[in-house]
Amino acid sequence: MNLTKVTVDDINVKGKRVLVRCDFNVPLKDGVITNDNRITAALPTIKKLIADGGKVILCSHLGKPKNGPEEKFSLAPVAVRLAELLGQDVVFANDDEVVGENAKKAVEAMNDGDVVLLQNTRFRKEETKNLEPFSSELASLADVFVMDAFGSAHRAHCSTAGVTDHIKDTAVGYLMQKEIAFLGNAVENPVRPFVAILGGAKVADKLNVISNLLEKCDTLIIGGGMAYTFIKAQGGNVGTSLVDDTKIEYCLEMIEKAKKLGKNLVLPVDTTCAKAFPDPIDVPVETSVAPTFEIPEDLMGLDIGPKTAEMFADAVKSAKTVVWNGPMGVSENPSFANGTITVAKALAETDATTIIGGGDSAAAVINLGFADAMSHISTGGGASLEYLEGKVLPGVAVIADK
Ligand code: AMP
């Protein structure tokens, strides 16, 4: 897909103040960053703007502070790590009101190529409601706005959307550009056969994704907890497996839709079961395998079975484009991880363009050591799902077209 949005390659930032919305929502334990992937992912855009002589003002949210500023949600550790990774100073403007005296002074004192990080945007109650005056305050710091927080692009907040009411010079960063290119291409212009694999807990979370992907792909594979509602809808006995009775009708509609469109809708043929949901979740338990349509009354399906895992892996082999979102079972538990591991391996071994849609499947692929073998691992779980639903993300829509 040709990206129609202005990118950081199209703008001249020399001597200008550039506000960059990053996704620095990193996991923290006792004030220490436990995984800095999101900071690393933001570096190409930041380095480019520094090299071009911009005054680089970074902002992001971190966690979910409920009642304004809270020390444990401070971006201070991010400023330290970012300075190490960039090999240059990062001035942390530690204002509870985000755009306060520290931020204003720091920005005023900037030379070309300097970097300032603002405090957590969610310290302001307006942020998630996209309300003034926070949007205009943020905008008052800068001449240009660059959106590079794909993981937050599905939310219209002050720092992802509202700010562009006041700054007209806008662009997307490299991370956004890559996400849009891979996800957009897969959905709008896939090299076929295009196989989509969906898993995870609930059908209800992925209603629009299922419906939209059925239109776009050649084969839609459904595993994970969501499969059992489809099986029950067709008269199968699913024991005590996760089922959403309010979505039976919907599943039948999707089966009908697949038939009408001539698409393959592939469901598990066997399932790995246990007596109950594992508690604690990661303790191995005794399992047995049953056909998905004949799960004994007292058993719960917690992973796709071995036959299904091979069947799904085979379907991936002949694909040219694969999009995967959601684990095939309760992959947090080694007794129910085989399905997810087998699918991840199949994706790692195929020559197809492979796109992992954030969240649990991204974590599984990374933890299993297959990250380098994938074409693209999305940094945004919710955002990539909305993209696969065919929605226009507000944080993309607000950026100027070329
Ligand atoms: P999601 O956030 O929708 O991608 O779902 C991820 C969660 O789905 C993981 O925590 C899995 O443990 C859970 N899950 C996957 N398969 C099943 C299943 N068969 N029964 C219950 N939960 C499942």
Image (cartoon, rainbow, N blue to C red):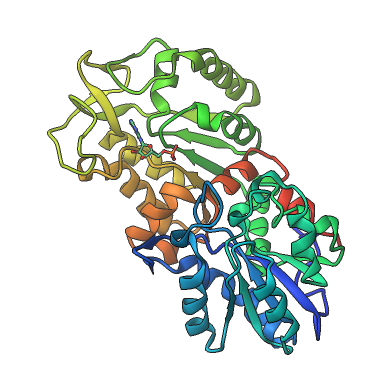
Side (left or right) of 295 relative to 207: left
Q: Considering only vertical position in the picture, is 239 above or below 394? A: above
Side (left or right) of 321 relative to 230: right
Viewer-side residue, 150 vs 179: 150
Residue lying at the far front of the rendered structure:
101
Residue 134 pos. (x, y %): 73, 56
Q: Considering only vertical position in the picture, is 294 above or below 336? A: above
Residue at (21, 45) in percent of width and height? 334
Side (left or right) of 348 relative to 116: left
Viewer-side residue, 13 vs 55: 55
Quarter of the image where the C terminus is located: bottom right
Residue 339 pos. (x, y %): 31, 41
Residue at (42, 48) in percent of width and height? 361
> Residue 231 occupies which quadrant of the picture?
top left
User: Ligand 1 sits in which quadrant?
Assistant: top left
Q: Considering only vertical position in the picture, is 39 above or below 122? A: below
Disc tally is 0
Viewer-side residue, 108 vs 394: 108
Quarter of the image where the N terminus is located: bottom right
Residue 149 pos. (x, y %): 62, 60
Residue 250 pos. (x, y %): 55, 17
Residue at (77, 51) in percent of width and height? 132
Side (left or right) of 183 relative to 87: right
> Residue 273 occupies which quadrant of the picture?
top left
Residue at (75, 87) in percent of width and height? 53
